Image: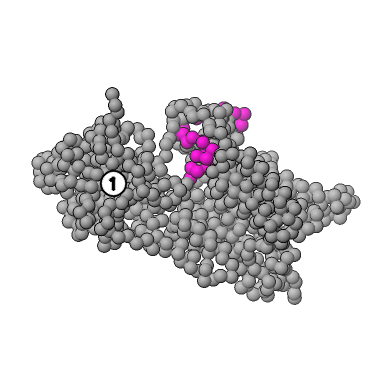
């Protein structure tokens, strides 16, 4: 499909490009250039942008749909009466925006399910370890512990409710579509397939007989449960993992193969061949055959967004060919975007929509600019290789804003890897997988052998091209600047400026004073500290995940001067592992070394040794406005031995002070350590509640000694421990209590002007906090 799209870009009859022949070589015209089309020549792309903008920007805020429809009809009438003047264009554009707003209006709220519920329904779509299941009262997203059922299966599952923590600043909103549809997320305990298609829910035995049978079965059915983790990891590192997800390329290969077979039959000039005798009718039948084959393949894999886009583009190209009209690539893409959006407006918020259309737009915008610099008299084979590289680079650049925001990694050799992998996996692997899945046994085994050998050759080349990916992390504003840099036409200064700002935007934020950011990592602690002199510290890393690492990268922090581990519980240690592995760390501060049974902590310790990171104990004396207060040697001697001291009570306790404002980070200390510290602690202004607000902490003596103005509770929503406990909250009555499960990420800034407190909101910015002050209920 990409190859045909490139040919459409270069061969359309407008002034954007042409192909000619001179001395037996292909000659590219010097008029090849990229850019968005004019309204006069191709109005449909403008209308597609207006429709998508209406769905994404205005749809969530629509309350009354009837008025929107009336306004849309009125604007269309105004546009019809205005003729070809500018007012007609504006009226039609506004009408399209209002149509998008009406389509994107929220639907009725679903009936909430019980905390533990039995779900029976049909799997509609699968993404990673989750699947959307339609049941009699609505739809629900299920998180599976292992193998995920394929789309179309009827399942019965025992589930429990899952409440996700608020998103970290700049984090992609992965649950926006679910919230918009009022769709719950639930965790599956166990499940079973009960539908009529239960028999083919696993990989066939024939596919397991070859080395790359899992890859072939994924290409044939869209199921990824049988894939080898090593194969998936290699494809991800080389930027070719998109070949495992059935996309427009696969649809294009299938449709193109069927179209080529039909054309071959038409070329057989024999008396018995009906295709030759009725050539004009046969041309229509061949085009229809290609469209139907694309639809059948898309139906087999569950109609993902990329497949829907490709089917519409194939249908549009076939229709233009039959009508003997020029194929305009921008019009094809716009038609597909509008059709997909009208059919399923909610898919606009999904990552698949952005990646699928972003890759095509990158080919249309970037590839022609690259081909302008190619000499016109190259040999045919070399020209074909350069065309393939240009298409791969265009697709990579088109998806760069989303990949830098969502995945924070770019493979530098991805264009070369795709040049090899696309023909092998797409051109050979897809037909072989389909033949193996639906043909007789002998033909199926031959197809499996051919497909596995082709994929094996591709994997061998990819192993040679395997290099660590480049880290490129941006937030939503950085992604927008990358889009501006890609779409800036004939503005090299604007393009370079937008690119520089997108990469260096986090470093432009100036901080005056001491800044303490309590991250909403769920059930755990993670605190980022920026000192007045510019040093950056991290106190704990939260539960096991890459969320803290990805947030640090989005903020532009590639070096940490110090990392503190209060104690080696997983809700404090887990998130530090990827941080230590990926970032530069000046020193690591912890209360004690690991014990033999602490495998995760020992692995972190070994990583620190391998990276030659200095390790400090609780007696380390940091420079500047910070002090380590606990565990002190005197307290440890009083407790006899470290082994008799619980990990919670032996947590590191860090105090920060600036301009008379004090912050206390006590880890998970409990009453024993609190009573000891209450004799030494001064009054503080901001306190991180010990042990997430557990009933074993926040003793009377500790509350009186610290007497904070602000109390921060870092906990997960509806956590199984019940944090914070009501009795603990009662201890802090009269104080300003803020919680990460309610307010999200909290940022405290101490400066000469006093203390400011802000929380991260879902609209993408920090806003002043309205604290919750605990007061007892009246009797």
- The quadrant where residue 71 appears: top right
Q: Give x and y (percent) for residue 23.
A: 75, 75
Does residue 497 appear left or right of residue 714 in this picture? right
| Residue numbers of the magenta segment | 174-200
Whether residue 54 is in magenta: the answer is no
Q: Which residue is mark 1?
A: 601
Q: Tag 1: Cα neighbours inside 10 Å, few (<14), some, or many (≥20)?
A: many
Does residue 197 appear left or right of residue 764 in this picture? right
The residue located at (29%, 61%) in the rendering is 534
Q: Give x and y (percent) for residue 325.
A: 78, 58
Q: Give x and y (percent) for residue 708.
A: 22, 44
- Return the residue nearer the eye: 168 or 377: 168
Question: How many marks overall?
Answer: 1
The residue located at (27%, 34%) in the rendering is 729
| Residue 533 higher or lower than 777, as above or below | below
Q: Is residue 20 visible?
A: yes
Badge 1 element? helix
Whether residue 193 is in magenta: the answer is yes
Q: Give x and y (percent) for residue 661.
A: 22, 52
The residue located at (60%, 45%) in the rendering is 101
Q: Quadrant of the N terminus?
A: bottom right
Q: Quadrant of the C terminus?
A: top left
Does residue 614 appear left or right of residue 486 in this picture? left
- Return the residue nearer the eye: 374 or 757: 757
The residue located at (17%, 35%) in the rendering is 700
């Amino acid at each position: 499909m990409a190859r045909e799209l490139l040919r459409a870009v270069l061969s359309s009859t407008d002034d954007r490009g042409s192909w000619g022949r001179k001395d037996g070589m292909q000659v590219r015209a010097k008029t090849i250039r990229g850019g968005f089309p004019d309204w006069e020549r191709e109005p449909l792309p403008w209308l597609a942008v207006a429709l998508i903008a209406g769905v994404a920007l205005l749809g969530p805020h629509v309350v009354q749909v009837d008025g929107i429809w009336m306004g849309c009809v009125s604007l269309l009438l105004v546009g019809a009466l205005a003729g070809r003047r500018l007012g007609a264009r504006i009226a039609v554009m506004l009408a399209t925006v209002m149509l998008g707003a009406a389509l994107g209006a929220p639907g009725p709220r679903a009936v909430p399910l019980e905390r533990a519920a039995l779900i029976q329904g049909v799997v509609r779509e699968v993404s990673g370890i989750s699947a959307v299941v339609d049941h009699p009262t609505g739809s629900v997203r299920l998180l599976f512990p292992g193998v995920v059922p394929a789309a179309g299966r009827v399942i019965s599952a025992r589930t429990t409710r899952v409440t996700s923590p608020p998103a970290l600043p700049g984090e992609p909103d992965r649950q926006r579509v679910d919230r918009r549809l009022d769709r719950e997320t639930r965790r599956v305990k166990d499940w079973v397939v009960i539908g009529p298609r239960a028999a083919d829910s696993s990989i066939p035995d024939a596919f397991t007989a070859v080395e790359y049978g899992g890859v072939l079965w994924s290409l044939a059915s869209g199921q990824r449960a049988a894939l080898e983790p090593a194969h998936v990891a290699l494809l991800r590192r080389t930027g070719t993992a998109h070949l495992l997800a059935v996309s427009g390329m696969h649809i294009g290969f299938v449709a193109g193969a069927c179209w080529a077979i039909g054309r071959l039959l038409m070329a057989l000039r024999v008396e018995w061949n009906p295709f030759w005798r009725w050539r004009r009718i046969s041309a229509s039948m061949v085009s229809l055959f290609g469209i139907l084959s694309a639809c059948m393949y898309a139906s087999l894999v569950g109609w993902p967004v990329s497949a829907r886009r490709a089917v519409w583009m194939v249908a549009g190209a076939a229709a233009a060919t039959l009508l003997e009209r020029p194929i305009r690539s921008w019009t094809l893409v716009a038609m597909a975007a509008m059709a997909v959006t009208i059919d399923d407006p909610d898919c606009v918020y999904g990552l698949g929509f952005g990646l699928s259309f972003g890759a095509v737009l990158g080919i249309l915008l970037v590839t022609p600019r690259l081909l302008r610099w190619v000499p016109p008299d190259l040999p045919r084979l070399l020209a074909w290789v350069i065309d393939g590289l240009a298409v791969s680079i265009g697709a990579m650049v088109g998806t760069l804003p989303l990949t830098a925001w969502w995945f924070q990694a770019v493979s530098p050799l991805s264009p070369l890897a795709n040049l090899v992998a696309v023909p092998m996996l797409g051109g050979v692997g897809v037909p072989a997988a389909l033949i193996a899945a639906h043909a007789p046994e002998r033909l199926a085994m031959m197809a499996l052998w051919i497909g596995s050998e082709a994929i094996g050759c591709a994997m061998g080349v990819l192993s040679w091209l395997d290099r660590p990916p480049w880290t490129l992390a941006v937030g939503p504003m950085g992604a927008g600047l990358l889009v501006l840099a890609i779409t800036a036409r004939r503005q090299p200064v604007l393009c370079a400026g937008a690119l520089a700002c997108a990469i260096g935007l986090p470093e432009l934020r100036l901080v005056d004073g001491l800044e303490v950011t309590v991250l909403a990592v769920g059930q755990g602690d993670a605190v980022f500290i920026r000192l007045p002199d510019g040093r950056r510290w991290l106190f704990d890393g939260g539960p096991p995940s890459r969320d803290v690492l990805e947030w640090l990268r989005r903020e532009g922090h590639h070096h940490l001067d110090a990392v503190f581990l209060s104690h080696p519980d997983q809700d404090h240690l887990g998130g530090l592992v990827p941080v230590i592995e990926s970032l530069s760390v000046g020193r690591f501060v912890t209360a004690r070394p690991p014990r033999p049974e602490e495998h995760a902590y020992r692995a972190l310790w070994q990583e620190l040794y391998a990276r030659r990171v200095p390790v400090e104990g609780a007696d380390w004396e940091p420079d500047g406005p910070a002090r380590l207060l606990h565990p002190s040697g005197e307290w440890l001697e009083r407790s006899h031995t470290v082994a008799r001291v619980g990990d919670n009570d032996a947590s590191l306790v860090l105090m920060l002070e600036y301009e008379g404002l004090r912050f206390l980070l006590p880890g998970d200390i409990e009453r024993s350590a609190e009573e000891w510290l209450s004799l030494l602690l001064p009054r503080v202004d901001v306190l991180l509640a010990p042990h997430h607000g557990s009933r074993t902490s926040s003793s009377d003596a500790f509350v009186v000694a610290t007497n904070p103005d602000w109390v921060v509770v870092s906990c997960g929503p509806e956590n199984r421990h019940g944090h914070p406990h009501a009795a603990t909250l009662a201890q802090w009555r009269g104080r300003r209590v803020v919680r990460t499960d309610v307010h999200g990420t909290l940022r405290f800034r101490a400066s000469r002007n006093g203390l400011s407190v802000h929380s991260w909101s879902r609209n993408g910015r920090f806003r002043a906090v309205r604290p919750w002050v605990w007061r007892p209920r009246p009797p």
